[in-house]
Image (tube, coloured by chain):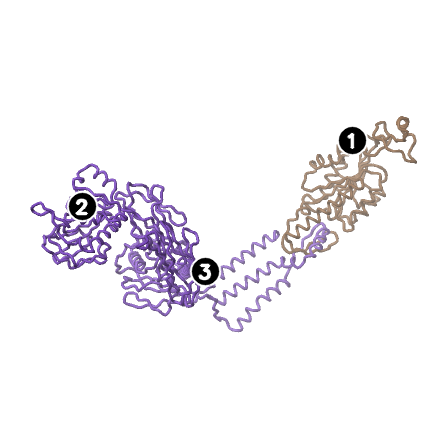
Chain colours: A purple, B brown
Amino acid sequence: MWPQWTNMLSPWQWAALAAVPPAIVALYFLKLRRQPLQVPSTYLWQKSIEDLHVNSLWQRLRQSLLLLLQLLLVALLMLALVNPSWQGTRLSGDRFVFLVDNSASMSATDVKDQGVPTRLDLAKRRVSELIGNMKSGDKAMLISFSDTGQVVQEYTTNPAELRRRLATIQPTQRTTSLTEALRLAAGLANAARSAASRPEEKPHDVPAGAATSSTTTPSGGLPATLVVLSDFRFPDVPDVPLGNLTPKFELIGKPEADNVAITMLATRRYEDRPEELQVVGRIENFSSQEKTLAVELLRDGRLDDTREIKIPAGGRQTVPFPSKVMESGVFSMHIKAPDDLAVDNEAWAVVNPPHRGRVLFVSPGDEPLRRALGTAKAHELADIRIEAPAFLTTKEYTAATEGGAFDLVIYDQCAPKTMPPANTLFIGRLPPDGRWQQGATLGDPKIIDTERTHPLTQLIEVGDFVIAEAKVVRPPPGGVSLFEAAEGSLFAIAPREGFEDAVLGFEIFATDAQGQRVANTNWPLRQSFPLFIHEMLGYLGSGAARLETDSLRPGQSLTWRAEGAAEAVQVVAPGDHKITLPPQENQTLQFSGTDAVGVYEIHQGQRPVRRFAVNLFSAAESDIRTQPEHSLRLGHSEVRPATHWESVRVAVWKPLLLLALAVLLLEWYIYNRRVYL
Amino acid sequence: MKGERRSPRRGQSVEFADFRNYSPGDDIRFIDWNTYARLEKLFLKLFLEEEDLHFYALIDGSLSMDFGTPTKFEYAKQLAAALSFIGLVRADRVRIETLGQAAHAPGPVLRGRRSLVRMQQYLSEMQPGELVSLADGVRNFCIRNSGRGILVLLTDLMDKQGYETALRYLVARQMDVYIIQILSAEELEPDIKGDLRLVDCEDNDAAEITVSAPLLARYKQTLNTFVAEAREFCHRRGMSYVLAKNEVPVDQLVASFLRKEGLVR
């Protein structure tokens, strides 16, 4: 930002201008008229003057203060006359929407040489400049976005308010998605036709979750300029309803930014030695130089292991650590690399104590199932209680199920009167809540397909057993068919208020017309059967406190079921922030305050029950090298973000003139009050 | 001739004042023989002097006194009148003169309450504008008026040759000397600003100043030093010194300050 001068004066005028200050100085000394004043005696005055002459230079300067001020005044006036200007950005139009990226990558410090600590600060400074270039009466809106958009300030003509709100934009550790922010901007900007006539409307913060739902397709609306300030580390945006918005993109950040990131940290128990854990991390080098760095593995905050690794430019390296014996705890991995983004230099992996499910198996007598549930492996996964169908009518059953004593109830050839608050597996029967429909009865059906993506059936090979008789089951909406025959589903699973119900359309053992118990299928003789039981115990029976995962991305929400009776649940976030979640009726809790990376602890009734980690683990965010040459696909058009900002001359004679006025006032004040100077 | 006034000097009266050591040449009539009998040392008994009082008010009539509201000269006349009135009431011998009083026309000698009108008349005819230095004026006065008494010198002490010579003349006299330095508010707290050329009203000497806070501070410091020096000078020589500001009413000055100094009881 250097001033640009316009030579508006001829040499003669320049000469006249240059002669003004010497003239003032000459006049000041020539025309200094002292007012005569008669006093009784100059005796004391003479003495005083003599004393003061000792430090005369400073005195003379002090006496010439008015002269100096006059010279300054004239200099300012002359400067204003010369009409200097600053480089600025041309803003066309009278409505602006500023989209400021505050995702994790915007915390990168590669722009330090531009006098700001992070990219976000640079973007904010840039927006502030743009606000300064707005004409009076121009309206502007401010939106920050990471993986969701958030309205920071609705349309306003008040630049001070815009700047104040701009300062409130904080960096997040979330990933980036432009689509939601663009939808939000388009929706608000075009819906603002009515709001524009109400400029006094108070700005309100749209909560992160709710903002994304406003995906109204704009039509019409007043045209506005959309300025997106980001490092553009996000994928192409295929479908953008921009409406009347004219987008402009400004790239923040440098292509040569330097970052090394942990993109994975995982723990796994060995199959054969379940007490031992394998810890594996993955480190990627998103820079143009080979990096040698130290990796530290901390176990519950204490140094456990270190590695020194070498990663080529743009490469990645998996770092396995030798097996660790651990029941529960937290592993954290640090890399010591002075890079431009700090948030991905640390990662956490939690090891929660293994949870044993509580399973109730109600059956009139099914030997294969009973055996499959009686293995050592099954008992490792769950406590299994076996009862006859008569148990369903007892008070003990009612009390136990309503108290949440079971994670999974298996109803073999029987059904309860009401659905228990637990996961269920129905074998050869339908759940009594009427949501499930029964189809035709099939003889010797062939299973032609299994759902390979569902954890229950992903490992099961079903082509090698036969079924004598089966009924087609139709799950309620939201259900998934797991075994598919030509006529319909034979095994399906569907959610129910935070639980899941699985229904197997065929019995393992059936009672024939004579009351004899006969095998309905030879599945128990196949290898896939114990595997199925194992997966079932693991998936459906793994317990109330089960988390979907132990590792989340910042901003992701987490849903889990509280264990047992409804107690107050507290989540302790990194930095010891405590968030209390109100108890829910169906014990399903949701937590979405995962904004910061680190380890979160879930407390139930003052005792910690489980931990989970929030890690960035995003190559897109960690790769902070901007790509000025790469064009971004936006809808059907390709845009290339501007790296150099268009400039326009912004005249500064007005502030200079105001300054001159201020100097004049100061001079007047000093002239009147100079006695005290 | 002895009068009513009790002088701080020691003299001959019936009222005992003090003892002092005998030194050769003292009048042996005043030796306290009783004390000598007890202590075998010679002490002189001193007695209070009572005298017929000569009261002189000497007013500085120079041009520099013609400043201020009221003018310092006016103030000096009021003060002289007030003090003289006290003298008249106590039947003292009162004489009011200015520094430039011509030897052939000395001020009238006043005595008694009846002379009040004459004193007023005389004072009202008195005008400032005498071109005589402080030293010359005092010397002339001393030559004309010898003997004991009280002398009140009403002046601003602003003499470029210095006041010291003038006051030294008075030291030599056997008088109780009171110096009342009268300064105007303009001199004590100058309220001026801008670029000024200060002209001395007596000798047209000019001082060019640009008023600033340091200059004013320096002026005040100089003034304070000047006053302090004058006070010190007077006290060392047994003279009383009073600084009077022309804005303080005369009655207040007489009632408080001068009483404190012992001029008025």
The location of residue A497, given as percent across then percent down, is 23, 47
Q: Which mark is residue A411?
A: 2
Residue that protrudes farthest toward the bottom in the picture: A11
Q: Tell me which chain the residue with mark 2 is part of.
A: A
Quadrant of the rendered image containing residue A92: bottom left
Whether residue B192 is visible to the viewer of this picture, yes or no, is yes
Report crowding for label 1: few under 14, some 14 to 19, many 20 or more residues within 10 A (C-alpha). some
Describe residue A530's horizontal placement relative to residue B92 as left or right.
left
SS label for mark 2: strand
Name the residue type under label 1: Arg
Q: Do the residues under discs 3 and 1 have CB atoms within 8 angstroms?
A: no
Q: Vertical placement of B198 versus B154: above or below?
A: below
Between tags 3 and 2, which lies in front?
2
Describe residue A155's horizontal placement relative to residue B101 as left or right.
left
Q: CA distance from mark 3 to mark 2?
A: 65 Å
Describe residue A134's horizontal placement relative to residue A423 as left or right.
right
Q: CA distance from mark 3 to mark 1?
A: 92 Å
Quadrant of the rendered image containing residue A149: bottom left
Observer-nearest of A294 and B198: A294
Q: The N terminus of chain B lies in which quarter of the figure?
A: top right
Residue that label 1 marks: B90
Between tags 2 and 1, which lies in front?
2
Between tags 3 and 1, which lies in front?
3
The location of residue B85, given as percent across then percent down, is 75, 34
Report crowding for label 2: few under 14, some 14 to 19, many 20 or more residues within 10 A (C-alpha). many
The location of residue A71, given as percent across then percent down, is 57, 62
Same chain letter for marks 3 and 1: no
Q: Which mark is residue A116?
A: 3
SS label for mark 3: loop
Q: Do the residues under discs 3 and 2 have CB atoms within 8 angstroms?
A: no
Q: Tell me which chain the residue with mark 3 is part of.
A: A
Q: Vertical placement of A275 versus A399: above or below?
A: below
